Image (cartoon, rainbow, N blue to C red):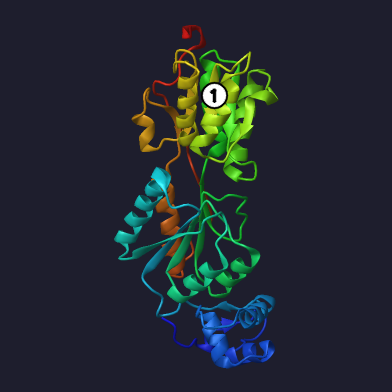
Amino acid sequence: MTGSTDPSLLTQTPGPAMTVAQIAELAGVSVPTVSRVINGRSDVAPLTRAKVEEVISRHGFRRLKRPANRAALLELVFHELAGAYAMEIIKGVERVADQNGLAVVLSEMHGHTPGRGWIEGVLARRPIGVIAVFSGLTPQQSDQIRSRDIPFVLLDPTGDPGHEFPSVGAANWSGGFSATRHLLDLGHRRIATITGPHGMLSSRARLDGYRAAMDATGTPVSPELIYEGSFQTEDGLNHGRTLLGLEDRPTAVVTHNDLQALGLYRAAAEARLRIPDDLSVVGFDDLPLSNWITPPLTTIRQPLTEMAAAAANLAVTLGRGEVPTHHRMELATDLIVRSSTAPLHAQV
């Protein structure tokens, strides 16, 4: 897994082929050192590694073909490896891995950007492809992934994926619009929302969908009814306490994921409010828990397993050196109506 690299696999773009020896000369290091950096070996001093990576980045080196000894692995990287969200993703990736005789490696980055040591591990493992869930890369990590020609796919990206890497997401704007329009059709006008972080692409899109639905019916959007969270249960509990404590409290709330809705259920119980008699609630994701809480949660289904399978297929296709039919995919979301929403006039 950590043998020397064939110099013919590296080229300068544009320009003639550049060998490992030429890289070493430009960086002022030995040929074996360059080979160790290219292969993700850990036995290289940080400053030396940085010199080599700078040369590779500056001259645009890339692999011409997939190395013959690439491991039969799909690398799945989470910002947080916990909960039903992660399990739905794992199911989709494992399904595609099984179909292609691959194993799945799970990593957790403890944040939305992988740590510096993670990239060396990927280079050493040489997987067929990497799928990063709800995360992104630093510019330097992007250069390293590209220079080794390791297929990299973004799943549910946190920011605009652009065209640098393939991506798979969901129709978040449509989901936010449908959730809010459902409540408006039930007669609600005092509709609050608890969002995810403003810097996250999915959160901004869901909030824009909420605003668009309100605007479409001429319903004013009150700033005091919009609270920013972090996709955690505590968002629903803490912001729910504030919203339900208002003198003119909302009659309905759109949350940006099912976990926030779960926290909101607790806040409503503390305020002695009944769902949906006193408060209608809509979630987002349609995690398995949404059908088991009381009352069952009306939510927007985000097809996480299907999204994960699509991302895995993209990674496998790229790992085989083939060109995928789609570079950027957005799967549809659906409104799943259960018992947590009711017409306004039915509330007492």
Q: In which quarter of the image is the N terminus?
A: bottom left
In the image, is residue 194 above or below residue 39? above
At horizontal 47% and vertical 15% (from top left) the residue drawn is 272
Which residue lies at the image location 48% right of the left edge and 12% below the top edge?
343
**Front in this rendered view, residue 65 or 155:** 155
Left or right position of 57 against 293: right
Estimate the x, y position of residue 307 in percent, counting from the top left. 44, 48
Horizontal and vertical percent for residue 186? 51, 15
Q: Where is residue 310 in the image (x, y as percent from the top left)?
A: 43, 52
Q: Which of 176 and 195 is in front in this view?
A: 195
Where is residue 138, by image quadrant?
bottom right
Q: Which of 29 and 216 is in front in this view?
A: 29
Q: Name the residue under label 1.
A: 253
Question: Left or right of 33: which side holds 313?
Answer: left
Direction from residue 172 to residue 262 in the image, left or right: left
Residue name at image x 57 percent, y 58 percent: 113
